[in-house]
Image (cartoon, grey):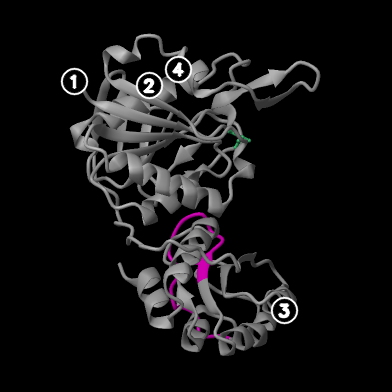
Amino acid sequence: MKNMKVAIIFTGGTISMKIDEKMHAAVPSLNGSEVMTFLPNIEEITDIIVDNYISVPSPFITPDIMMDLSIKIKDYVNREDITGVIITHGTDTLEETAYFLDLHILTPKPIIVVGAMRSVSELGYDGPSNLAAAIRTAISVDARNKGVMVVMNGDINAANEVQKTHTMSLDTFKSPEFGPLGIVDNDEVFFYRNSTHVSTYIPTTQIEHKVYLLKVVAGLDGELIDFFIEKEAVGIVIEALGRGNVPPMMVDSIKRAMDLGIKIVLVSRCPNGRVSDSYGYDGGSKKLRDLGVIFGRNLSGQKARIKLMLALGFNNNYEYIKEIFEKV
Ligand code: ASP
């Protein structure tokens, strides 16, 4: 087992936080080496490289930071002595960063994103156990060719399936439609399956920033789409109702956006299930598809936005964007 090296890139989040006594609220406090002191014997299992990249709460993480992080990870995975890479991250935007990396890095080596729900100051700080499980996964031969994974609370989930499902539970990262890829049981790593969908690699160095996400609610009209047009949107993700339907009052603005060449990707605000062209009424998913709206399968709105930012950064061509979202 020795001679393997795992690089751990620290970005911050609750795993690196303490409760500030004056504010009675958690703030970034610990660097990577300080977090690693909670895992005193880990060097017996594998050599570790601690990389103190940044220390921020995850609401501070932007797609530009994700791109920079991705380039850094590629440098590590290209090194022969590196077995796998772990990224510590705040849990709030963790699934977006994990999915970005899944779309942007092509490697058989395990890349694992990990965080904690309780800070160092709280009873039951889950950082060390999550990090230990991530390290076990990073050195597992079975973890190769599995895409980017999220390891939390003993579960291994695929970046393209996982969601943060609870605001405070330790068992928050789940893939409700499919279940975990595997588990970490003490020092053993077991995989039950591969991910349901291999994310298409997007080999871009640019991201398109002018991509907006809109959640549809009962009675919504086209005003927000008009606003995005005014802001010179290049792409819009619509988190639609049910199977992919919108109120009829939105349709004219959607048409106008499409006529201007804005790429529109439709996903559902339901946490599970695919969009489909099942409904033929005005604003129904079939009518939207006939207009040329692209279907984003069962992606969440936040993941579809990340994918559209990367895809448009690579190639603003309708057929390419459609293919990358709709192909199985
Ligand atoms: N608000 C924190 C963050 O995302 C939550 C966490 O890390 O669990 O940085």
Q: Is mark 4 within 8 Å of ligand 1?
A: no
- Which sits in the foreground, 153 or 50? 50
Q: CA distance from mark 2 to mark 4?
A: 10 Å
- Locate the C terminus and report the quarter of the image it occupies: bottom left
Point 73% across, 75% down: residue: 227
Q: What is the x, y in percent for residue 140?
A: 23, 30
Q: Which callout, 3 or 1, points at the residue further toward the start of the chain?
A: 1
Q: Which residues are magenta?
A: 266-281
Marks 3 and 2 close (CB-CB < 8 Å): no
Marks 1 and 4 close (CB-CB < 8 Å): no
Say above or below: 144 vs 301.
Answer: above
Identify the amino acid type marked 2: Ala
Label 1 packing within 10 angstroms: few (<14), some (14-19), many (20+): few
Q: CA distance from mark 1 to mark 4?
A: 19 Å
SS type, badge 3: helix
Marks 3 and 1 close (CB-CB < 8 Å): no
- Locate the N terminus and report the quarter of the image it occupies: top left
Identify the amino acid type marked 3: Glu
- Which sits in the foreground, 208 or 149? 208
Q: CA distance from mark 3 to mark 1?
A: 57 Å
* Residue 230: mark in rendering: 3
Q: Which callout, 3 or 4, points at the residue further toward the start of the chain?
A: 4
Q: What is the x, y in percent for residue 202?
A: 36, 63
Question: Mark 3, mark 2: which one is toward the viewer?
Answer: 3
Q: Which residue is mark 1?
A: 1
Q: Which callout, 1 or 4, points at the residue further toward the start of the chain?
A: 1
Question: Mark 2, mark 4: which one is toward the viewer?
Answer: 4
* Residue 36: mark in rendering: 4
